[in-house]
Image: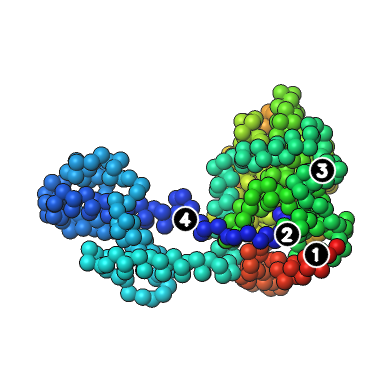
Amino acid sequence: MTDTTWNRPAPAARKSAPGSEAERTLDVISLGRRVRHLRKAKGMTLDDLGAAVGTAASQLSLIENGKREPKLGMMQALAAALDVSIDSLLGAEPPSRRAALEIELERAQRGPLYASLGLPKVRIGSRLPIDVLESLVGLQAELERRLNEQVATPEEARRANGELRAMMRERNNYFPEYEAEAQKVLDSVGHTSGPLSQHVIADIAAHLGFSLHHVNDLPHSTRSVTDLKNRRIYLTQSQRSDHDPRSVLLQALGHFVLQHQTPSSYGEFLGQRVATNYFAAALLLPQKATVEFLQRAKAAKEIAVEDIRDAFAVSYETAAHRFTNLATEHLGIPTHFQKVHESGIVYKAYENDGVTFPADHTGAIEGQPICRYWTSREVFSVPDQFSAFNQYTDTPAGTYWCTARIERGSAGKFSLSIGVPYQHVKWFRGRDTTERSKSRCPDPDCCRTPPGELASQWSGFAWPSARAHSHLLAALPPGAFPGVDETEVYSFLQAHAGD
């Protein structure tokens, strides 16, 4: 990720994620309002419609008020009695502006935010003036907007991360729009093959109208700073970093090429980070050349992440990420990726192959302990930590083959692993491994509950002093770019404006 400050207006607030509780509730309420609108348009009372569909008026009232979801048979009967198709009955658009306002207010009053205010609910009926509806809905929207501007809690951050991961899974982690933008940039500088050199990247920056400036005083909370006023990108001169300097620069350019606005929520911030990471990888490992390389490796049944790394002169982690971008879309191979700390905690992960990662109640997997029998944990106990470690793991979700390597970062050792279901291992080098393990997670008796003999010896006699992860209890840093000190950034830009 690259922390970059932008002076552009924030976009409109995001809508509820598809499939969310708010959306499902809204559908039921919308259906009820549509039934009421159609009934009144035909001049029917609740009793009239109840007699036509064979149910009590009180039951119809619950449906019209969005408090009961009708079964398919009842929906068919309602559609017939109201002389409309079921599709019309389930239409996405409310039948009128008033109905839309009623739906929105009802949705708001059933939500957790309104409940937290302790206010009585407004009775929504035909006598409620439309200007009052407008005001109430507007007040609710403004309250939500202001709360969203405040710092996010760790739980909200995990929820946003879970939603983003679900979207990536749905798209098989493949984004053709970012591939196309990256190819346009490569075409603009005439790069056709071979690793992307610093010289070519400098040409890309110049083509996009930016000059590069390496400094010793880059704000400590950033990896780069982009000055849009003077079209400059500031980078550190320090060589001590866990990040490829080429990738840092390309991510900074990605914000510009992809026309990012100042993020208005933590979820949008995460989405932009994924987009720029993807864009940078698509430049370092161009789609056409990388797919051709992978297809040749698949034909030879010799796919190996280290070969991708060496062919394009990138890190093992970047090569593994790029494999997940292209494997399903172009090779038909579902896969999963993990970056796991030596403590067993998941730092990053992706899957579209049915593997079951540990997750909290929000669906977030970052910060969760991975099963100690998985390849990503077993690799830490292997004597040879310079070669790839391959292992088959039997899990409740099926058997998976995984390959893993260990890399060292500023926070310690990490394992980086790629895995596939058993039926796809035939395409990979290392499939002949005899290493095999069995995981019963999420069964706590697999590896989270101490063995009975140990527990009987030490239960009640051990009192460890745990490391205090105070950051898990704190709110995320405030601001559009969490963790970035904007005063420090602005002071830095002001100091260098005359250079």
User: Which label lies toward us, 2 or 3?
Assistant: 2
Give the mark, 2 or 4, whose residue is nearer the N terminus. 4
Check the picture and name the quadrant holding the N terminus.
bottom right
Gap between marks 2 and 1 measured at Cα: 9 Å
Residue 314, image x, y percentages = 80, 42
Give the mark, 4 or 3, whose residue is nearer the N terminus. 4
Amino acid type of the residue tagged 2 in the rendering? Lys
Question: In what element is the residue under mark 1?
Answer: loop
Residue highlighted by disc 1: 497
Mark 1 crowdedness (10 Å alpha carbons): few <14, some 14-19, many ≥20: few
Residue 421 can be seen, yes or no: no
Give the mark, 4 or 1, whose residue is nearer the N terminus. 4
Residue 189, image x, y percentages = 78, 37
Residue highlighted by disc 3: 203
Residue highlighted by disc 2: 229
Give the mark, 2 or 1, whose residue is nearer the N terminus. 2
User: Which label lies toward us, 3 or 1?
Assistant: 1
Residue 412, image x, y percentages = 79, 58
Image side of residue 62 versus residue 220, left or right:
left
User: Which label lies toward us, 4 or 3?
Assistant: 3
Image side of residue 75 versus residue 491, left or right:
left
Pointer 2 with pointer 1, Cβ within 8 A: yes
Amino acid type of the residue tagged 3 in the rendering? Asp
Q: What number is the disc on residue 16?
A: 4
User: Which label lies toward us, 2 or 4?
Assistant: 2
Amino acid type of the residue tagged 4 in the rendering? Ser
Give the mark, 2 or 3, whose residue is nearer the N terminus. 3
Question: In what element is the residue under mark 4?
Answer: loop
User: Which label lies toward us, 4 or 1?
Assistant: 1
Mark 3 crowdedness (10 Å alpha carbons): few <14, some 14-19, many ≥20: some
In the picture shown, does residue 247 fall above or below 112? above
